[in-house]
Image (cartoon, coloured by chain):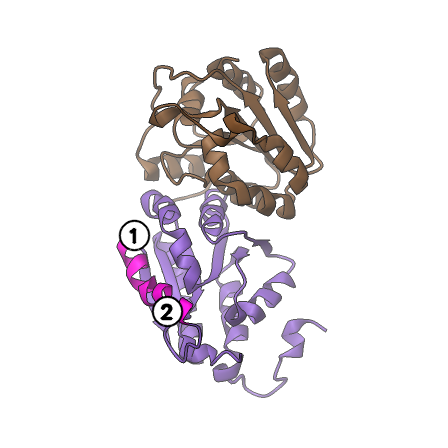
């Protein structure tokens, strides 16, 4: 499926959700759908997106947090699935945009292109809901499902086309993004 | 009986040479810590038990130490103060992830119990123990060292202030000499 259309559908139905993006194309996809103060874009710290989402979800239990990341970034956070399952937040959703490749670095095949199914790993770890989606119609259903209360953390793998689309670059000023995000939540600077 | 009650000295003044974990816990609670993540270390065991009994603090056990750096960043994004506990060997696992709080100028408080520097029996602890401070400084984290029980309580209290009131990334290294020789 088309990654930009899939992400746009999820964001159109975000309903106040706070969004954290993994470095590379997921950050571009979320930015392409419309820059927003409640988006927290990562440009580095590979393997940190899901757990940044966990810390945020624990600090903001009244809001849903949606992490949108890629298969390579989530593979580097393999242990995070255990940590998140044990923490068991009811307001953390992880969306893995899985093109089965390291797209940013020359389209080398990743582990998910060699048989690793991240949604099954998350299920085995104890996530409340998991799934693998292959069409935009399924993403429409997922967008509605995500608005419903969760019994625990959820992880969904979206199988997307392996292609490098024109980049839509979010600001690289990390302090600006942080302060803008916190201001959205009514939090000040130091 | 809670851990705090079990190790309370009652009406006697607290002896920080022995009771520093309790003093450190009080200092962290006074600093408003709401999230704590950890990879266990024997030197942190009392503090971990105290936090796990504190209902106002969410604790996360980690599979590897760098996870705690990302959790701390997310906690601050959402308005909560946090602390990450690890042993010196875990600092090596954290280096690239530390670019996250350093580059975003997000408060970070790490409490690191040292190995490989004093009465060390296990030579495998030496390389990372000797590299810990240099690694932290190289990535841009401010390092403070505590050698005595009274030191560690005072240093943790003021490190929390610098981290959360001045957006600093700070590691407090707790001396192996203070932790005592491990029995084999």
Question: Horizontal and vertical percent for residue B31?
Answer: 48, 62
**Residue B126: which quarter of the image?**
bottom left
Mark on residue B126?
2
Say which of B32 and A186 sits in front.
Answer: B32
Instruction: In the displayed orientation, state which residue is furthest to the bottom.
Output: B12
Question: Horizontal and vertical percent for residue B124?
Answer: 41, 67
Residue B19 higher or lower than A24, as above or below:
below
Is residue B164 visible from the viewing direction of this image?
A: no
Chain (purple): B
Residue A119 higher or lower than A136, as above or below:
below
On the rendered structure, is B138 left or right of A114?
left
Residue B143 higher or lower than A72, as above or below:
below
Please tell me how crowded label 2 is: few (under 14), some (14-19), or many (20+) other residues with Cα within 10 Å: some
Q: Residue at x 53, y 80 (%)?
A: B183
Is residue A34 visible from the viewing direction of this image?
A: yes
Q: Residue at x 37, y 44 (%)?
A: B100
The segment highlighted magenta reads: B123-138
Question: Horizontal and vertical percent for residue A68?
Answer: 50, 29
Callout 1: helix, strand or loop?
A: helix
In the rendered image, residue A27 lying in the magenta stretch gets the answer: no
Chain of the residue where label 1 is placed in the rendered structure: B
* Residue to which mark 1 is pinned: B139
Q: Earlier in the sequence, mark 2 or mark 1?
A: 2
């Amino acid at each position: 499926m088309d990654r930009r259309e899939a992400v746009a559908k999820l964001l159109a139905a975000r309903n106040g959700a706070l969004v954290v993006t993994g470095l590379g194309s997921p950050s571009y996809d979320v930015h392409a759908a419309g820059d927003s103060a409640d988006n927290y874009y990562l440009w580095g710290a590979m393997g940190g997106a899901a757990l940044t989402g966990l810390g945020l979800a624990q600090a903001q239990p009244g809001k849903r947090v949606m992490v949108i990341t890629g298969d390579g970034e989530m593979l580097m956070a393999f242990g995070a699935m255990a940590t998140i399952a044990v923490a068991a937040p009811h307001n953390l959703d992880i969306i893995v945009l899985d093109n089965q490749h390291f797209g940013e670095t020359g389209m080398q095949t990743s582990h998910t292109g060699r048989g690793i199914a991240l949604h099954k790993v998350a299920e085995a770890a104890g996530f409340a809901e998991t799934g693998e989606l292959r069409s935009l119609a399924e993403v429409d259903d997922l967008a509605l499902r995500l608005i419903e209360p969760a019994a625990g953390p959820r992880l969904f793998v979206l199988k997307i086309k392996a292609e490098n689309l024109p980049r839509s670059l979010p600001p690289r000023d990390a302090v600006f993004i942080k302060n803008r995000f916190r201001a959205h939540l009514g939090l000040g600077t130091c | 009986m809670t851990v705090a009650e079990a190790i309370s000295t009652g009406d006697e003044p607290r002896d920080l040479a022995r009771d520093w974990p309790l003093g450190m816990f009080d200092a962290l609670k006074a600093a408003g810590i709401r999230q704590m993540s950890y990879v266990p270390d024997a030197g942190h065991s009392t503090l971990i038990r105290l936090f796990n009994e504190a209902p106002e603090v969410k604790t996360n056990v980690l599979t590897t130490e760098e996870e705690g750096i990302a959790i701390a960043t997310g906690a601050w994004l959402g308005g909560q103060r946090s602390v990450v506990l690890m042993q010196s060997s875990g600092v090596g696992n954290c280096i690239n992830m530390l670019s996250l709080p350093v580059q975003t100028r997000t408060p970070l408080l790490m409490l690191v119990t040292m190995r490989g520097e004093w009465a060390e029996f296990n030579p495998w602890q030496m390389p990372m123990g000797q590299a810990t401070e240099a690694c932290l400084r190289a990535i841009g984290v401010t390092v403070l060292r505590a050698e005595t029980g009274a030191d560690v309580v005072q240093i943790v209290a003021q490190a929390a202030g610098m981290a959360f009131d001045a957006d600093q990334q700070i590691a407090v290294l707790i001396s192996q000499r203070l932790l005592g020789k491990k029995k084999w």
